[in-house]
Image (cartoon, grey):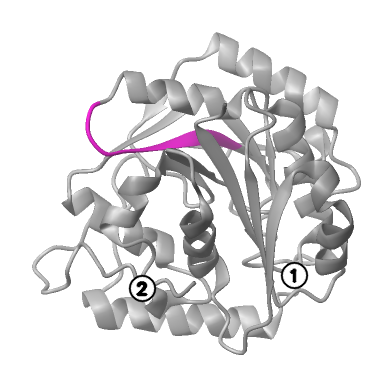
């Protein structure tokens, strides 16, 4: 029996959600693990697809229509509240997990004592003008290498490459992946999960990781575990659009609002260390642990 549940919050991302689910069932070591999907305010056929395919794919799914959207952080917390295993593998709905992504993260818990947040190395297409070739824990490839969209992604080629990469490399970076991470369920609950002031999205991950660091959580991102990230398919360019110059206005507004709320909470925006991991902002009265306020 699997010790792990994978969870996926999603919002109007059906073509990529299908790939994420397929990769979990095809590539995870525990490929029959419980899988929880939270679909919120979807209008792209996600609800219907889940209803028609959940039994066959072993998906426990929840559909909500909310005027005040839970978004990414709230969606993660919703999913975690449903998990009955010891560990949770938090995925975004624009991922493709490489072979053994889950078991390689689980192995870290035999090596590290205390509260640990484990993350996979991320590989993604360089769809933005300022993308480097590498930053700690993330590799960027030309859009023609593996593909960049749901309809041109070369799954078999990427899986072969990722397997060889993980075999030949053993790199650990002290950081967490904002786009997905792996932890004990109790450790997510103990810190209180994501702060709901950042709903529906943006800055919730940096706030969470700062609070975790100030409570002595440990962080490891390992090259032994790899995910392909289609890059910002929820936060910037949903609906499988190929027009990367046009960002939906509501997403721009959500980011502006969350940025202002972060500044109001912490007094300023955070800096990053040499590993490009967020540096905690100290000297405030903000509690590191927040009340688990998730309303089931």
Residue 293, numbered label = 2
Answer few, some or many: residues within 10 Å of disc 2's Cα (few below 14, many 20 plus, some between 14 and 19): few
In terms of image quadrants, where is residue 26?
A: top right
Mark sitting earlier along the chain (1/2): 1
- Residue drawn at x 65%, y 67% is 236
What secondary structure is marked by label 1? Answer: loop
Q: Nearer the viewer, residue 207 or 28?
A: 28
Residue 138 shows up from this direction: no
Q: Position of residue 289 (x, y in %)?
A: 22, 63
Q: Write down the region rendered in magenta.
A: 113-122
What secondary structure is marked by label 2? Answer: loop
In terms of image quadrants, where is residue 173?
A: top left
Q: Which residue is mark 1?
A: 245
Determine whether 188 is above or below 74 in the image.
above
Q: Position of residue 96 (x, y in %)?
A: 71, 39
- The CA span between labels 1 and 2 is 37 Å
Asked if residue 44 lies left or right of residue 285, the reply is right
Q: Position of residue 186 (x, y in %)?
A: 33, 47
Q: Position of residue 166 (x, y in %)?
A: 57, 17
- Residue drawn at x 76%, y 68% is 12
Q: Nearer the viewer, residue 215 or 292?
A: 292
- Residue drawn at x 62%, y 78% is 251
Determine whether 36 is above or below 161 in the image.
below
Asked if residue 97 lies left or right of residue 186, the reply is right
Residue 206 shows up from this direction: yes
Asked if residue 147 lies left or right of residue 165, the reply is right
Q: Residue furthest top?
A: 168
């Amino acid at each position: 029996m699997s010790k792990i549940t994978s969870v996926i919050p999603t919002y109007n991302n059906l073509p990529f959600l299908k790939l994420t689910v397929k990769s979990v069932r095809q590539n995870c070591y525990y490929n029959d693990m419980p899988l929880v999907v939270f679909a919120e305010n979807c209008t792209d056929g996600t609800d219907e697809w889940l209803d028609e395919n959940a039994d066959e794919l072993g998906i426990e799914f929840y559909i909500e229509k909310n005027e005040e959207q839970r978004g990414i952080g709230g969606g993660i917390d919703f999913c975690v509240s449903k998990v009955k295993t010891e560990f949770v593998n938090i995925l975004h709905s624009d991922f493709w997990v490489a072979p053994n992504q889950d078991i390689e993260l689980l192995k870290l818990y035999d090596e590290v004592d205390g509260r640990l947040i484990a993350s996979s190395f991320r590989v993604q297409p360089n769809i933005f003008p300022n993308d480097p070739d590498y930053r700690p824990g993330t590799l960027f490839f030309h859009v023609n290498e593996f593909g960049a969209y749901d309809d041109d992604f070369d799954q078999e080629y990427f899986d072969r490459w990722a397997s060889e990469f993980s075999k030949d490399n053993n790199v650990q970076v002290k950081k967490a992946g904002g786009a997905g991470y792996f932890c004990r369920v109790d450790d997510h609950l103990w810190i209180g999960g994501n702060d709901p002031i950042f709903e529906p999205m943006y800055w919730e991950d940096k706030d969470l990781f700062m609070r975790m660091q100030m409570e002595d959580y440990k962080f490891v991102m390992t090259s032994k575990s790899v995910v392909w990230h289609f890059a910002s398919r929820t936060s910037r360019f949903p609906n499988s659009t190929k027009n990367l110059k046009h960002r939906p206005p509501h997403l721009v507004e959500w980011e502006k609002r969350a940025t202002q709320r972060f500044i109001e909470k912490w007094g300023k925006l955070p800096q990053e260390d040499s590993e490009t991991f967020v540096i905690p902002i100290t000297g405030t009265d903000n509690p590191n642990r927040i009340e688990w306020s998730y309303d089931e």
